């Protein structure tokens, strides 16, 4: 049996209201903070159990009794798996991702959860869109690539999907205190957060999720990850320190300026673009070379991993002076904490406010930092597992551009020749993927596991 | 003229809805984060300009034209001061604390602000109470000590105050998209946060304030500040380090256990009480001695100020090796950052999530940490200025209990004799006050300056 503190977040809303997007965002956010969370997607259960062939709009007609029954069975199985995850599976938060558009369905779900896990908190998150443009965008960007419509003509697919929405509308009952009970905990999001109603939210985890939801929006904006230029310390393979840029480092910084000027002239960098950097010399010098009229925010929490007593050591010296430390580090690079310094896990925790800040931003962000810090940002936005963080490659003289969208994170790699200023571009390059875990879309998104 | 990024938070609601409490909490929270904020309290302007003698309920009757005119003049003056604060006074956020219960008044206020500071964001925060108990408590705890009722019989004062509320009710128009405009930014708090409606909130500062408001509640709970017991390092006056407790330190930890057992038996410590401590030996050993069935949370962000290269130095050694550093530190102890270490300002920033956590908590919290860290907590909750932080006394073998309430922070000091276990108690002790700034209620609360 699970010991208190479990939370189920139940999504509510018509199809194409961004429910799955929100569900996955919540899961990503919580897992990043070591709070085990999984998304249980009803649509996926339906596709697994009923196949996709029969899933035309008729299937969703509330008068089609066979369809109703099949869908209830799917809901039941999904619910059972979810409860197992929360009781014996070590899960802390589960997101129940379905339409849940009737009071009766919501009561059934809540009762089933409470019966198995009496102390579990159930929070409903309803997404309401009155803006037709948002809905159309959702259908185009997310639903047409849906397995239900594989091989179907896009126009036909949109028509069918709009019909499916109409079927759901027949029985839709919005969340309210009157119908769902005064003590019902819920969050209603209107037009992707333009208006938010929060009812009866208590407790640490619940408040955390709600604060996060309040800052969620769906404006994808590029995030540029820029490693500081070359330093003498880097050439000597030394840890940490606060060395200035070498001549090569300065050349890179200049070339970087040209690169961003070009991005700006192409409209990819806006007036409101922010540059975040650390307080160290190498990062500050690199950031200050980017002269495109954007504000530079120097942040101590973006400083490199603190190597404690090992600051300034070369790997060779480390091996001589602290051989056991080095082997400990090899055994668990994520959790290994340098003597009086930090571990990668510490670092992940330290930079969290900046990740949150970038997620809230509606404008591009440029992060100029060191390898250890950029590894964390790269992992978060391109949806790598935390375990991968210490191993992700962050090449020198190279800009990584990420555009995290609803179902994918676009990656561009710009390798800059510091002599000629020439830029070599690669899209979604394989080289950036870690070798530890095979990463495929299905691996990431199957059942919403992230 | 102010450059963008200014925010006015306008309070809305009937009297005794906790508006001033919320206003001051926001100001405290923002100022702590170096965002200059002041509360402009209409009631204070009225009292300053019209005196308190005439302020019986009749004065607030919307049909009393003289009263209406006088109150409008007060509003005008208050508004002018506020605009001055935001344009030439260096203020970033101003809280306009009045009832603002009509659409017309709100439009007037917004237009006046927008005319002087076009880029200023105006956010309304409405407090709605339908629970009579909360209202009665508010009147008793806050209003009877109000200068308007100095020397008035309490029963008579309550009666008059309830009449005053009735006068306001005559013209009260709740905030809504329909009357105040679809793009109106507002937060509606029902019964102190049980239900929250957020409309059209954008931007960094605004989201920050709203997230804070969502977690606000009015359950005062004690916060115990406990300094780690004695160590050899402390005896030698050395900075930082990670020494274990001495025999005396262990005795103190034992006596501390008895102290908290007594607090528990008296009902002051609840089942849900949390113990927050750092990852160092001395704090962990001290915290673990407190055996009252409460969960201990070891947090790295509660570790002592990082002294960088000066770690482990005695003050004498510091003087010999880094004489200029020491004089720099003396010149600005708040901002002085140890070489590769931290400043007090860094520390204040570092512990912010824990302050937020304690504010959200509805149960007592025990913080076991070192002097530098406890200074920050003490300053925040007992409403000291940030400048005072590095100078606040944190005596050894002593527990500080704080109960921050709406209009005051109660302080108790428990000096523990480590041999006999005897406890000497002092209430609101003067000794804890810093000498730098004379601290009086009027100093802190006059015009909401904190």
Image: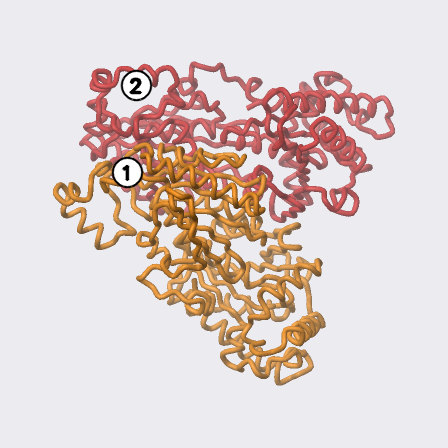
Chain colours: A orange, B red
Residue B267 appearing in the image: no
Query: Which element type, helix, strand or loop, lies under badge 1?
Result: loop
**Of A448 and B381, the residue lying toward us:** A448
| Residue A308 higher or lower than A140, as above or below | above
Residue shown at the point (25%, 39%) measured from the top left: B285
| Residue B69 higher or lower than B356, as above or below | above
Across and down, in percent, residue B104 comes to: 81, 35
Residue A342 appearing in the image: yes
Q: Which residue is mark 1?
A: A240
Q: Is residue A322 left or right of residue B101?
A: left
The chain identifier of the residue carrying mark 1 reads: A
| Residue B317 higher or lower than A177, as above or below | above
The chain identifier of the residue carrying mark 2 reads: B
| Residue B96 higher or lower than A13, as above or below | above
**Of B133 and B437, the residue lying toward us:** B437
Residue shown at the point (38%, 61%) measured from the top left: A430
C-alpha separation, residue under disc 2 versus residue under disc 1: 22 Å
Q: Which mark is residue B325?
A: 2
Label 2 vs label 1, nearer the camera: 1
Across and down, in percent, residue B119 comes to: 67, 33
């Amino acid at each position: 049996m699970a010991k208190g503190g479990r939370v189920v977040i139940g999504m509510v809303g018509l199809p194409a209201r961004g429910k799955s997007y929100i569900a996955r965002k919540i899961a990503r956010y919580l897992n990043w903070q070591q709070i085990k969370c999984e998304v249980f997607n009803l649509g996926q259960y339906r596709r697994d159990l009923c196949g996709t062939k029969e899933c035309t709009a008729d299937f969703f007609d509330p008068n089609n009794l066979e369809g109703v029954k099949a869908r209830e069975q799917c809901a039941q199985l999904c619910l059972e798996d979810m409860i197992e995850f929360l009781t014996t599976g070590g899960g802390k938060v589960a997101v129940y991702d379905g339409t849940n558009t009737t009071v009766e369905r919501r009561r059934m779900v809540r009762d089933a959860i409470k019966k198995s896990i009496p102390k579990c908190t159930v929070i409903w998150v309803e997404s309401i869109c009155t803006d037709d443009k948002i809905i159309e965008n959702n259908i185009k960007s997310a639903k047409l690539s849906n397995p239900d419509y594989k091989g179907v003509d896009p126009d036909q697919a949109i028509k069918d999907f709009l019909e499916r929405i109409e079927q759901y509308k027949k029985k839709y009952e919005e969340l309210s205190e009157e119908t769902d009970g005064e003590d019902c905990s819920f969050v209603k999001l209107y037009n992707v957060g333009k208006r938010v109603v929060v009812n009866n939210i208590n407790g640490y985890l619940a408040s955390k999720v709600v604060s996060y939801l309040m800052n969620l929006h769906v404006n994808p904006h590029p995030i540029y990850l820029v490693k500081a230029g070359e330093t003498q310390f880097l050439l000597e393979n030394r840890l940490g320190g606060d060395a200035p840029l070498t001549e090569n480092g300065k050349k890179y910084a200049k070339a970087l300026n040209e690169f961003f000027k070009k991005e700006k002239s192409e409209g990819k960098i806006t007036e409101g673009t922010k540059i975040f950097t650390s307080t160290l010399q190498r990062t500050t010098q690199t950031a200050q070379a980017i002269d495109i009229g954007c504000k530079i925010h120097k942040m101590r929490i973006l400083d490199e991993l603190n190597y404690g007593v090992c600051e300034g050591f070369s790997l060779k010296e480390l091996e001589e002076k602290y051989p056991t430390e080095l082997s400990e580090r090899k055994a668990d690079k994520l959790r290994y904490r340098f003597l009086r310094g930090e571990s990668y896990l510490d670092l992940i925790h330290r930079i969290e406010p900046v990740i949150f800040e970038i997620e809230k931003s509606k404008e591009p962000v440029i992060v100029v930092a060191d390898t250890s810090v950029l590894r964390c940002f790269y992992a978060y936005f391109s949806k790598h597992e935390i375990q991968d963080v210490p191993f992700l490659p962050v090449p020198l003289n190279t800009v990584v551009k990420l555009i995290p969208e609803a179902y994918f994170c676009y990656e561009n790699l710009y390798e800059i020749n510091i002599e000629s200023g020439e830029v070599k571009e690669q899209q979604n390059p394989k080289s950036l993927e870690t070798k530890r875990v095979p990463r495929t879309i299905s691996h990431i998104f199957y059942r919403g596991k992230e």
